[in-house]
Image (spheres, helix red, strand yellow):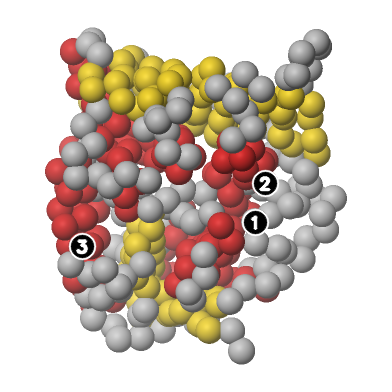
């Protein structure tokens, strides 16, 4: 009999429902130590609570007060997906309530809030805490990561990682909280997309030492949905040019978090160029990855169709495609596996230390973009890999 971890969901919007879908399809996974069961949900939107009432029969508690959920002794762990401005208070209260946590990025609206979360986490070392970041669970991304970890790429020439959206190019798109600095945070697009872009580089030990950021704000107001216009106060795009120095490598790394990327619906990618081998994966081609071996002579990229080669085995045939909903489920499989004492099959969700390091990068990028200067990244208090 598989162990069951009982979850509460705080924030029942898009990602809260994605988790519910992943949990409902747990039989899709072929071999897991444990499974999640959602037993409590919290949101101030009654319609979202009704969605869980209609679709998730295991839920026994419905509330608009997250503290009522945290007081529920039947809840072992919490998934929290709320606006950034609420991260510090909610995450701190979740940890103080003794609940394991998978929290959304950026894990605090800014570095100061993240430090407060980390201080409370240090007081509760027995809790498993991770940050949501699903894109590296695509099979092609795992191939790139494995090649980078192998040491076979030789001297690294450059790394580029990005997450590109296009919907904000529509000036008539109504505003939401992610375009409001007092709710989203001053990072703007970096706060929403930065952990996705930095997850793999930080996991590989590639921390920017210095950087220069170009921050772009093209949309200064948006419709309020009520016939008027309101200020749009967040950065639309960020391009961060950085220098990475390790004990045996020294190379440039470019990070892109763009909400106005014409033609890009939801594109995550990573490209690593080395003197001996190079590798590339993009979610625009979700079933493939590309690599190049160079030993002299012709230089030619190879492309491999991967099919459904997931980190956690599934019942889907290997010839079929892997998609976003699968990446979400794989991320959750990694978290639940760690809860059950496993090692996430070798690739864990983003850690609190990685979230803290990403705050250091984004804080430096914000200063650089505002002042148009090169800024050193201050990782004080952040442990090394």
Helix, strand or loop at disc 2? helix
Determine which residue is flagged by label 1.
311
Q: Does residue 377 appear anywhere in the picture?
A: yes
- Percent across and percent down for residue 382 are 25, 44
Residue shown at the point (37%, 20%) measured from the top left: 242
Task: Answer with mark 3 or mark 1, whichever residue precedes in sequence.
Answer: 3
Question: On the image, which quarter does residue 24 sit in?
Answer: bottom right
The part of the image, by quadrant, that contains residue 55 is bottom right
Which comes before the other along the chain, label 3 or label 2? 3
Q: Which mark is residue 135?
A: none
Q: Please tell me which residue lies in front, 305 or 13.
A: 305
Q: Label 1 crowding class (10 Å Cα cut-off): few <14, some 14-19, many 20+?
A: some
Question: Pointer 3: what residue?
Answer: 122
Mark 1 and mark 2: Cα distance apart in space: 7 Å
Nearest the viewer among 371 and 67 is: 371
User: What residue is pinned by disc 2?
Assistant: 139
Q: Residues within 10 Å of mark 2 (few under 14, many from 20)?
A: many
Is residue 197 found left or right of 359 in the rendered image? right
In primary-sequence order, the first of circles 1 and 2 is 2
- Compared with 190, 252 (above or below) is above
Distance between the Cα atoms at labels 3 and 1? Answer: 30 Å
Labelled pair 1, 2 in contact (Cβ < 8 Å): yes
- Point 73% across, 19% down: residue: 294
Most extreme residue toward the bottom is 1
Residue 280 visible here: no
């Amino acid at each position: 009999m598989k162990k069951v971890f009982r979850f509460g969901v705080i924030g029942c919007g898009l990602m809260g429902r994605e988790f519910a879908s992943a949990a409902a399809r747990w039989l899709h996974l072929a071999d897991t130590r444990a499974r999640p069961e959602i037993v409590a949900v919290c949101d101030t939107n009654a319609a979202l609570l009704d969605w869980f009432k209609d679709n998730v029969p295991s839920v026994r508690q419905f509330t608009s007060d997250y503290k009522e959920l945290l007081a529920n002794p039947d809840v072992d762990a919490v998934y929290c997906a709320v606006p950034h401005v609420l991260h510090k208070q909610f995450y701190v209260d979740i940890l103080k309530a003794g609940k394991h946590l998978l929290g959304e990025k950026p894990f605090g609206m800014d570095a100061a809030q993240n430090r407060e979360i980390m201080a409370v986490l240090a007081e509760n070392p027995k809790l498993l805490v991770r940050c949501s970041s699903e894109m590296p669970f695509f099979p092609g991304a795992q191939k790139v990561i494995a090649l980078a970890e192998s040491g076979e790429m030789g001297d690294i020439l450059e790394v580029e990682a990005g997450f590109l959206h296009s919907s904000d190019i529509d000036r008539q798109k109504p505003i939401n909280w992610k375009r409001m600095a007092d709710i989203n945070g001053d990072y703007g697009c970096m706060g929403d997309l930065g952990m996705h872009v930095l997850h793999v580089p930080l996991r590989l030990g590639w921390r920017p030492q210095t950087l220069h950021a170009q921050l772009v704000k093209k949309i200064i107001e948006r419709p309020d949905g009520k016939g008027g216009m309101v200020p749009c106060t967040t950065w639309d795009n960020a391009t961060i040019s950085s220098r990475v120095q390790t004990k045996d490598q020294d190379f440039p790394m470019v990070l892109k978090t763009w909400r106005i990327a014409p033609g890009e619906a939801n594109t995550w990618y990573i490209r690593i160029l080395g003197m001996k081998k190079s590798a590339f994966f993009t979610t625009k081609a979700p079933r493939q990855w590309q690599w190049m071996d160079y030993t002299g002579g012709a230089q030619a990229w190879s492309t491999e169709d991967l099919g459904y080669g997931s980190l956690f085995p599934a019942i889907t045939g290997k010839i079929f495609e892997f998609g976003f909903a699968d990446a979400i489920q794989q991320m959750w499989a990694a978290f639940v596996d760690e809860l059950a004492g496993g090692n996430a099959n070798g690739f864990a969700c983003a850690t609190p230390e990685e979230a803290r390091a990403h705050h250091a990068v984004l804080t430096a990028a914000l200063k650089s973009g505002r002042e148009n200067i090169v800024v050193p990244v201050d990782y004080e208090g952040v442990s090394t890999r």
